[in-house]
């Protein structure tokens, strides 16, 4: 199994920096640069770039520049996906983004990590674990989602949170570390009729 195949598995792994396929990262950097140079009216051009960059690209994927990722082939969108300004996805493992996902400005999805021991960090030893964002999730501004995390269907992550553990479905979770605040209920329905 080559290292790209290891990276594409839906499980964690450890590696040295010399294992990482730099030529694939270079391709992603070039495509991200091209994407970030596009104008607001160049939707078709943006779509073509994302189709080449991502492992799975759903045509209802909309990303506002500036956008950065490590590899691209490990990013998978599965329905309407709206990603706002200044998102970074460190996709050293698979990142699955479910349908009807909203990702606010400044979000970082970080599969990759570094060794805890300084001597191993200096040797370029790191870790990586996949991230799964299920359908109907809203991630607030400036949230960091760490590797190995699944955010359950329909949940909301409050702005500025650091998500380092799984979040169940149908809840609002906030903080650092991110914790469940409460369930989402019928009381959260917004009534659009004027009274």
Image (spheres, helix red, strand yellow):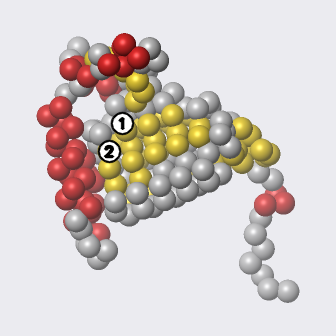
Q: Of all residues shown, which one is farthest toward the bottom? A: 195
Residue topped by disc 2: 69
Closest to the observer, 76 or 22? 22
Closest to the observer, 169 or 122? 122
Could you tell me residue 37's position as x and y percent? 22, 65
Q: Of all residues shown, which one is farthest toward the left? A: 23
**Quadrant of image for the N terminus:** top left
Determine whether the residue tagged by mark 2 lies in a helix, strand or loop: strand
Could you tell me residue 136's position as x and y percent? 59, 51
Relative to 84, say whether 18 is above or below. above
For marks 2 and 1, the one nearer the N-term is 2
Q: CA distance from mark 2 to mark 1?
A: 7 Å
Pointer 2 with pointer 1, Cβ within 8 A? yes
Q: Is residue 6 left or right of residue 22?
A: right
Residue in the picture at 62% in, 53% down? 159
Residue in the picture at 42% in, 61% down? 85
Specify the label residue 91 is tagged with: 1
């Amino acid at each position: 199994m080559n290292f790209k195949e290891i990276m594409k598995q839906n499980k964690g792994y450890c590696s040295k920096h010399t294992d990482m396929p730099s030529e694939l990262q270079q391709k992603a950097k070039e495509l991200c640069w091209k994407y970030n140079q596009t104008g607001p009216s160049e939707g078709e051009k943006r779509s073509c770039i994302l189709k080449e960059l991502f492992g799975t690209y759903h045509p209802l994927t909309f990303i506002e520049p500036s956008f950065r990722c490590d590899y691209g082939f490990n990013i998978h969108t599965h329905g309407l996906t709206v990603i706002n300004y200044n998102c970074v996805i460190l996709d050293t493992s698979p990142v699955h983004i479910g349908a009807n996902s909203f990702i606010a400005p400044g979000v970082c999805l970080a599969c990759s990590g570094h060794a805890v021991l300084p001597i191993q960090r200096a040797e370029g030893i790191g870790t990586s674990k996949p991230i799964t964002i299920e359908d109907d999730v809203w991630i607030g501004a400036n949230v960091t989602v760490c590797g190995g995390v699944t955010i359950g269907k329909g949940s909301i992550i409050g702005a500025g949170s650091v998500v380092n553990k799984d979040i169940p479905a149908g809840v609002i979770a906030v903080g650092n570390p991110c914790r469940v605040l409460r369930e989402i209920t019928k009381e959260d329905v917004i009534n659009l009729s004027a009274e």
